Amino acid sequence: MPGTVQSFFPSMGTVNSITVYDEKLRDTVDRAREFVLGLERSLSVFREDSELSRLNSLKSPEWMPVSSDTFSVIETGVHCGKMTGGAFDITAGPLSMLWKETIRTHRLPDRTEIENARNLVGYRRLLLDRARKRVRFRRSGQSIDPGGIAKGFAADRVSVMLADSGAEEFVLNFGGTVGAFGRERSIGIRDPFHTSGTLGTIKLRDSFAVTSGSYERSVTIEGTRRHHIIDPLTGYPSDSGLSSVTLVGKTAAELDALATAVFILGIERSVTILKENGTEAVFVTEEGEVLITPGLGNIFRFSGNSGGTI
Ligand code: ADP
Ligand code: MG
């Protein structure tokens, strides 16, 4: 389309895109991209020199002042921890690092390693000083993992940046966190069983659809598939019978964290949380069944003919 400005860029372990339908907003798009790259520089746990890595590697627990975006990510993460009964835990670092290593090396952690990591996870043992934007762990070895919320946080911020700069119509896609603003668009929901297919489309306008799934990063060891979303209660990759979940709503950071939590909790234990939060969902079970919440009746269209409403 003439006048379309689009930016594709790798960041946060995925490929991101920002599309704006107004030639005059090229600088704004560049600024938005720089914002995301800057956020990654502060939050990446894969960069030794990031703000978060410095916090995570403090030898003994002490207060550390952080930038206001980093503080917001952590604070929102704690809020989502409370909302999900701890299924989403912003301090999941010790466990998620352990299992990321497993996915990389195909070596299962032993019981002691899992127990040790599990004992370090718990957002209640994270202290936040809002007035001075400082953070502190209670115990050494604790660490923050922003992986389940950062893309959503970035998407919220970028959508505000674009709207404030006068963008009337835009689309964001930050690796499974998709937002469509200004005009209704049909967004395909990926079929977790067929990497190139979609299982349905969802109509979005001025809202986000956020997907969490086990198909992105996983490995099969001794007959069991292990993936990157960890149940803090057990210390193991979650096993709730879901293959993916897509949530639809207005706040991408919250949806991102909530999607990770719902994936861990499974359908039954998530229904109340979703209702309380006014969030609609598309669930795909490990058997390939697609279920939607009633509010999506007019918004979601199944590609095939299998599916139902919970
Ligand atoms: P993706 O990043 O694949 O889109 P998610 O948003 O579900 O999917 O985030 C998964 C990431 O969240 C993991 O790679 C890990 O870094 C982190 N994580 C894993 N388990 C938890 C958990 N229980 N609570 C918070 N973060 C988690
Ligand atoms: Mg998430």
Image (tube, rainbow, N blue to C red):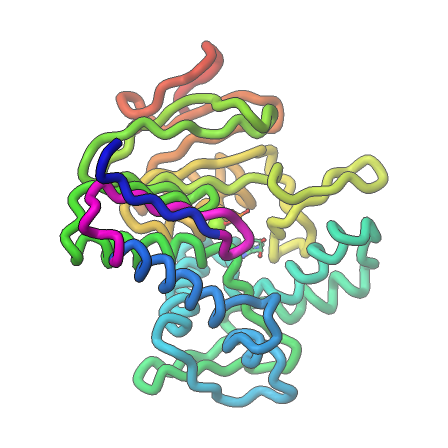
Q: In the rendering, at what x and y percent does residue 71 appear?
A: 39, 74
Check if residue 12 falls in the magenta segment. yes
User: How many numbered markers are drawn?
Assistant: 0
Q: Residue at x 57, y 34 (%)?
A: 242
Res. 206 in view: no
* Quadrant showing the C terminus: top left
- Residue 180 versus residue 55: which sits nearer the camera? 180
Check if residue 49 falls in the magenta segment. no
Q: In the rendering, at what x and y percent does residue 16 appear?
A: 44, 48
Where is 202 relative to 8, above or below? Answer: above
- The answer to which quarter of the image holds residue 298 is top left
Q: Is residue 30 left or right of residue 206?
A: right
Q: In the rendering, at what x and y percent does residue 289 appear?
A: 53, 21
- The answer to which quarter of the image holds residue 36 is bottom left
Q: Is residue 206 left or right of residue 93?
A: left
Q: Is residue 309 left or right of residue 218?
A: left
- Residue 228 versus residue 48: which sits nearer the camera? 48
Q: Is residue 29 left or right of residue 78?
A: left
Q: In the rendering, at what x and y percent does residue 64 appear?
A: 48, 86
Res. 309 in view: yes
> What are the residue bounds of the magenta stretch?
10-27
Where is 110 relative to 126, above or below? Answer: above
Q: Residue at x 41, y 58 (%)?
A: 80
- Residue 216 versus residue 281: which sits nearer the camera? 216
Q: Residue at x 41, y 72 (%)?
A: 70
Where is 218 relative to 184, above or below? Answer: below
Q: Residue at x 48, y 88 (%)?
A: 63
* Quadrant showing the N terminus: top left
